[in-house]
Structures are given as structure tokens and as C-alpha cells.
Image (cartoon, rainbow, N blue to C red):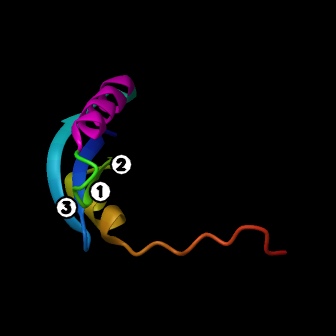
Amino acid sequence: MPYFIYHVKNPRQLEHIDTKTKYQDAKALVRERRSELDPEERFSVRMIFANNQQEAEKILSAPRDERVIGED
């Protein structure tokens, strides 16, 4: 399965940057793109491992539950 790299903007607007087959290549691209970001910009760069682009976008668009730390 390939690695899909996206710019994620608020509220969950996705812009596909690239697709890589190797993790090392995808990780290097994500680090490069993150280093180029201006702190004032309101978007991030995300990498997702999925079967296809539609699945990757569905996963990235799904709302995430808030993490609860220390609750027993």
C-alpha cells in the first residue's frame, strides 16, 4: 500500500501533494514540507497509509476523538 501526503487545512480541506511507495521517501517529503511551513499558516502536512486515495481522504476527513489522559 502506498503512502499519501496531504496538506490539511481547517476545516478538513485536503490537498493531495504526492504519493510514495516507500516509507522513508514519504517521511523525508513530509519533513521537508513541514520545514517550509510558515508558523502563521493554518494548515499542516500529514502522511497516511491506505489502499487508495479515496480511502486516505476518508480517513483524514473523519473526526477524531479527543484523547483523555489519566482517566481510569
Of marks 2 and 1, which one's residue comes earlier in the chain? 2
Magenta segment, which residues? Answer: 24-37
Q: Quadrant of residue 9?
A: bottom left
Residue behind mark 3: 14
Q: Which amino acid does label 2 sit on?
A: Ile
Q: Is mark 2 on a helix, strand or loop?
A: strand
Label 3–label 1 contact, CB within 8 A: no
Image point (46%, 72%), residue name: 64
Separation of residues labelled 2 and 1 (CA atoms) = 6 Å
Residue behind mark 1: 56
In reply to whether residue 29 is colored magenta, the answer given is yes
Label 2–label 1 contact, CB within 8 A: yes
* Residue 37 on image: x %, y %: 23, 43
- Closer to the observer: label 3 or label 1? 3
Q: Quadrant of the N terminus?
A: top left
- Closer to the observer: label 3 or label 2? 3
Q: What element carries label 3?
A: strand
* Residue 54 position (above or below residue 36): below
Residue behind mark 2: 48
Image point (79%, 74%), residue name: 71
Q: Is mark 1 on a helix, strand or loop?
A: helix
**Relative depth, front residue between 16 and 35:** 35
Q: Which amino acid does label 3 sit on?
A: Leu
Q: Which amino acid does label 1 sit on?
A: Ala
Separation of residues labelled 3 and 1 (CA atoms) = 10 Å
* Residue 12 on image: x %, y %: 26, 69
Mark 1 Cα within 10 Å, few/some/many (few <14, many 20+)?
Answer: many
Of marks 3 and 2, which one's residue comes earlier in the chain? 3
In reply to whether residue 28 is colored magenta, the answer given is yes
Image point (24%, 55%), residue name: 40
